[in-house]
Amino acid sequence: MIRVGIDLTPLNNQSKYRGIGKYTQRLIASLRSVKDIELTSLPNEADIVHYPFFDFFFLTLPFVKPKKTVVTIHDCIPLAFPDQYPPGIKGRAKFLIQKQSLKGVEAVITDSESSKKDIVKYLDYPAEKIWVVYLAADPCFGIVEDKKEKDKIKEKYMLPDKFVLYVGDVNYNKNLSNLIKAYSQVKDKADLVFVGKSFENKTLKEVKEILFLIKELNLEKKVHFPGYIPDSDLKVVYNLASVYCLISLYEGFGLGVLEAMSCGCPVVASKLSSLPEAAGDAALLVDPYSKDEIGKAIGKLLGSKKEREEYAKKGVKRAGLFSWEKVAEETAEVYKKVVKK
């Protein structure tokens, strides 16, 4: 029996609304059913302490580690785009401490082969100690047949009849300005819906820029901001959407792709970083720097019911290859390897 303590910090701050929070919640829930793994809230009783999040510019990892330690690093976005994520003097100092502290970690878990390469590149951490564990959509996501439930959610969030969907944050890597510009080419075919907690904060620089661009392109009546939507309702929103778009410049994995696919929503995704690993051949992959390519892909799906049905079918099959049972089992295998060392 291996006793594992998991750091719950991502569940006690803004991360709980983001992918990191979802990952931490699902990991804990899934590990409970794995044989030979016991979760403990008492670090002194743990054989291994697992930190499910690593921040480059804040001290999220203790320098002294009394127990064997595993860390999940989801991506290296701030290091890949240093101009967009300036750390400042204090941030740079903390980065050096975090990087040094990482050397005392027995294993790193990451979400994709793409992220593994970047961890080696930017953090100088040995590849042989990095384990790729692909994520999965929460089991709550799936096909919703009930028309009454769909109508209820559509009315609750005042959703249009036909829409392109984005779910996520507003960070630079999400490439939302190009999504809006690409969407403007097909605006007569559907509306555009942005779901996410960050969109509720109109004082955020990124949100201000998005609103300005929407106004500049005369899209105010076509773009909708329902804000944060809990998963229980979000699964229905995915079912209502005509197309889901995630055309990021960089993703550690791109969980939204599998969430959308699980719900039978056709996907347009970026062909960069980890997204091809998540999407496989079940999405239309595009150059995220090309507004025309993105617009054509969205237009292709909006304009053809046959294409939408084909990609919906492929997506459901693709999403079925990933599960939280697999995530838990593969994570437990990492724990076992660490304990044996």
Image (tube, grey):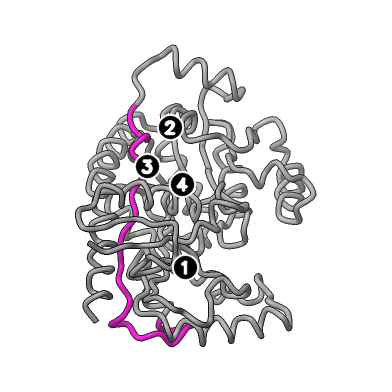
Q: Quadrant of the N terminus?
A: bottom left
Q: Secondary structure at mark 3?
A: loop
Choose mark 3 or mark 4, whichever is in front: 3
Q: Earlier in the sequence, mark 1 or mark 4?
A: 1
Over which residues does the magenta segment extend? 120-143
User: Does any portion of residue 78 appear in the rendered image?
Assistant: yes
* Badge 2 element: helix
Mark 1 burial class by Cα count in 10 Å: few <14, some 14-19, many 20+: many
Question: What amino acid does circle 1 point to?
Answer: Asp
User: Dot 4, crowdedness within 10 Å: few (<14), some or many (≥20)?
Assistant: some
Residue at label 2? 235
**How far apart are the two marked residues, 3 and 4, measured between alpha carbons?**
30 Å
Badge 3 is on which residue? 138
Amino acid carrying mark 4 in the image: Lys
Residue 285's x, y, as percent? 38, 54
Return the disc, 4 or 2, that comes first in the chain's sequence. Answer: 2
Which labelled disc corresponds to residue 251?
Answer: none
Q: Residue at x 39, y 57 (%)?
A: 40
Asked if disc 3 and disc 4 are in contact, CB closer than 8 Å, the reply is no
Residue 42 vs 60, above or below: the answer is above
For residue 216, above or below residue 43: above
Judge whether 158 appears above or below 16 on screen: above
Please tell me in which quadrant of the rendered image residue 2 appears. Answer: bottom left
Q: How far apart are the alpha carbons under marks 2 and 1?
A: 25 Å
> Disc 1 designates what residue?
75
Mark 3 is on which residue type?
Answer: Asp
Q: Nearer the viewer, mark 2 or mark 3?
A: 3
